[in-house]
């Protein structure tokens, strides 16, 4: 097994992206189906003149429109994520999340190689502010272009969020000041995902029970006989 050259090939990232795409298409199909049902109800209303059916039609069409907008946005987001995750590897960065009750949360990342600070705003159809929290490790994984946006995830690469650069200079400066005041930007740089893969691959595989039994069978007992019937002597340290 080689080292993952792209983020989408790392661990559970590919499966997480598939789940995101599946949910996006489910929302889009549900919205389209609801809108079609609303139009059918509308045709029945015109033909029968039933008063209460008009309110049902309006509600069904409204729900379908909302679901369709969520689905279309999610499908577009999934396509962006797929392109970004296929273009480069995960990079672990020291991160500080800045949640907001009114606005989308912002995240400040410290580049591991240059120490440059990047300020991003989370773009999400569904609010998941907890996914932007670094947690005990103090790190988030990043994949993308700092000038255009990319994917952010908690370590492991399975909680995918699309982020874009925070647009105004004033908001970026406010975010950097808040992150510096928190004291969390000074944490040591985290281990990179590729280094963790190398460490795992370098570890020797444990012997199975059959291999252990086979190895034990080759160790002669004291005063026993080796294969071929020859007499064996056992050497002990210091003996």
Image (cartoon, helix red, strand yellow):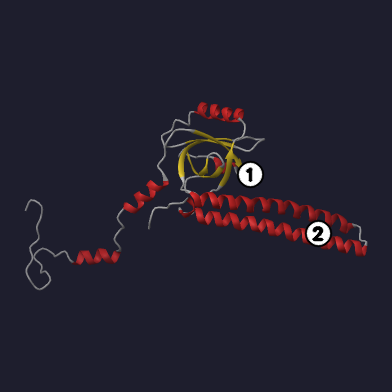
Tell me where residue 149 appears, x and y as whole percent. 56, 42
Q: Secondary structure at mark 2?
A: helix
For the residues labelled 2 and 1, the Cα–Cα distance comes to 28 Å
Q: Is residue 161 above or below residue 177?
A: below
> Of 191 and 166, which appears nearest the observer?
166
The x and y percentages for residue 172 are 58, 30
The reply to whether dot 2 and dot 1 touch (C-beta < 8 Å) is no
* Residue 158 visible in the current orientation: no
Residue, x 86% and y 60% (percent of image)?
42
Residue 123 lies left or right of residue 66; in this view the side is: left
Query: What residue sits 86% from the left and 54% below the top?
Result: 55
Q: Quadrant of residue 224?
A: bottom left
Residue 114 location in percent, x, y?
43, 34
* Residue at the disc numbered 1: 127
Image coordinates of residue 33 in percent, x first then y, are 74, 61
Residue at the spot x=48%, y=50% of the render?
7
Q: Residues within 10 Å of mark 1 (few under 14, many from 20)?
A: few
Q: Which residue is mark 2?
A: 38
Left or right of residue 233, residue 59 in this image:
right
Between residues 16 and 145, which one lies in front from this camera angle?
Answer: 145
Q: Which mark is residue 216?
A: none
């Amino acid at each position: 097994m080689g080292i993952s050259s792209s983020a989408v090939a790392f661990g559970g990232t590919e499966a997480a992206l598939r789940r995101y795409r599946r949910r996006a298409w489910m929302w889009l199909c549900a919205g389209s189906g609801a809108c079609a049902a609303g139009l059918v109800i509308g045709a029945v209303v015109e033909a029968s003149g039933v008063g209460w059916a008009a309110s049902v039609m309006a509600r069904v069409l409204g729900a379908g429109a909302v679901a369709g907008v969520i689905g279309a946005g999610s499908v577009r987001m999934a396509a962006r994520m797929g392109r970004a995750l296929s273009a480069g590897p995960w990079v672990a960065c020291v991160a500080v999340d800045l949640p907001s009750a009114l606005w989308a949360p912002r995240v400040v990342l410290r580049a591991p190689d240059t120490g440059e600070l990047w300020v991003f705003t989370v773009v999400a159809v569904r609010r998941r502010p907890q996914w932007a929290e670094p947690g005990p490790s103090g790190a988030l994984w990043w994949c993308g272009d700092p000038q255009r946006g990319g994917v952010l995830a908690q370590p492991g690469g399975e909680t995918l969020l699309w982020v874009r650069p925070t647009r105004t200079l004033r908001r970026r400066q406010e975010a950097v000041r808040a992150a510096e005041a928190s004291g969390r930007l000074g944490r040591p740089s985290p281990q990179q995902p590729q280094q963790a893969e190398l460490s795992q691959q370098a570890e020797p595989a444990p012997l199975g029970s059959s291999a252990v039994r086979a190895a034990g069978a080759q160790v002669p007992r004291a005063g026993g006989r080796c294969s071929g019937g020859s007499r064996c002597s056992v050497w002990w340290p210091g003996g």
